[in-house]
Each structure stands twice: as structure tokens, then as C-alpha cells.
Amino acid sequence: MLMMGERRPMIRTLRGWAIQVLQEAGAIRECEEHGWMQDRADPHARERALDIARGDPPAGVSPDAAAAEVRDVLNSIGDTCPECAPD
């Protein structure tokens, strides 16, 4: 019996795809209260995200361009939610 692997849902933008890859790898998370993306500062998760980007880029995007987009998105996300009160 042929088993199909789980496919990611269609993403409309390369940025949206990169965010999904980063979430899937555990490199970023969403603030539960406000919805802002937060960098988890996990180097292993970042490397997993880059491996996913290089190994399974969206159609029509080179592996290097996909990895570059993941890096760009990571660089644009902070490690704290701008709306949460500091501890």
C-alpha cells in the first residue's frame, strides 16, 4: 500500500512559507496572548529550519533562496513579544 507523507498546506508568499518552516522546526513560537512571533533562540531548531528550507523549497524557488528567506525572517523576529509586559 502506498502511503503519502503529510504535505504542508499551500502558502501564498515565500515569507509565509518561511514562517511555517520555522514554526515546524521549533525555531519560533507565537505569543499565546498577542499572536506575535518570537525567536526561541534554539540553534538546533534554526539549523533544522535551514535544512528543511534547503531540502524542500517551494516550487520555483532555489534551495539557496529558500534558506535566505528563512534567515531573513529569523532576523526580523525578536525574542520577546512587544505587547507583553517585561518580567
Image (spheres, rainbow, N blue to C red):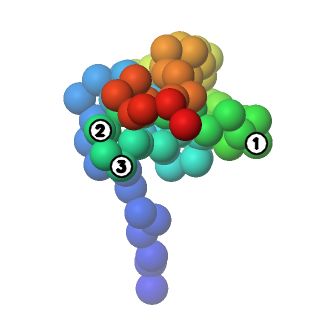
Task: Measure the alpha-carbon separation of dots 2 and 3.
Answer: 6 Å
Q: Which residue corresponds to mark 1?
A: 44
Mark 2 crowdedness (10 Å alpha carbons): few <14, some 14-19, many ≥20: few
- Quarter holding the N terminus is bottom left
Of mark 1 and mark 2, the one earlier in the sequence is 2
Disc 3, SS: loop
Mark 3 crowdedness (10 Å alpha carbons): few <14, some 14-19, many ≥20: few
Q: Position of residue 87 (x, y in %)?
A: 55, 37
Does 5 sit left or right of 83 as displayed? right
Check disc 1 and give the amino acid type: His
Check disc 3 and give the amino acid type: Glu
Does 4 sit left or right of 54 as displayed? left
The image's mark for residue 32 is: 3
Q: Position of residue 15 (x, y in %)?
A: 37, 22
Does residue 15 lie above or below 10 as drawn?
above
Q: Which residue is drawn at 38% across and 55% down?
A: 7
Looking at the image, the residue that sits furthest to the right is 44
In which quarter of the view is residue 10 placed? top left
Q: Which residue is drawn at 29% across and 23% down?
A: 13
Disc 2, SS: loop
Check disc 2 and give the amino acid type: His
Task: Measure the alpha-carbon separation of dots 1 and 2.
Answer: 26 Å
Q: Which residue corresponds to mark 2?
A: 34
Nearer the observer: mark 1 or 2; the answer is 2
Does residue 44 lie above or below 13 as drawn?
below
Marks counted in the figure total 3
Of mark 1 and mark 3, the one earlier in the sequence is 3
Does 36 sit left or right of 11 as displayed? right
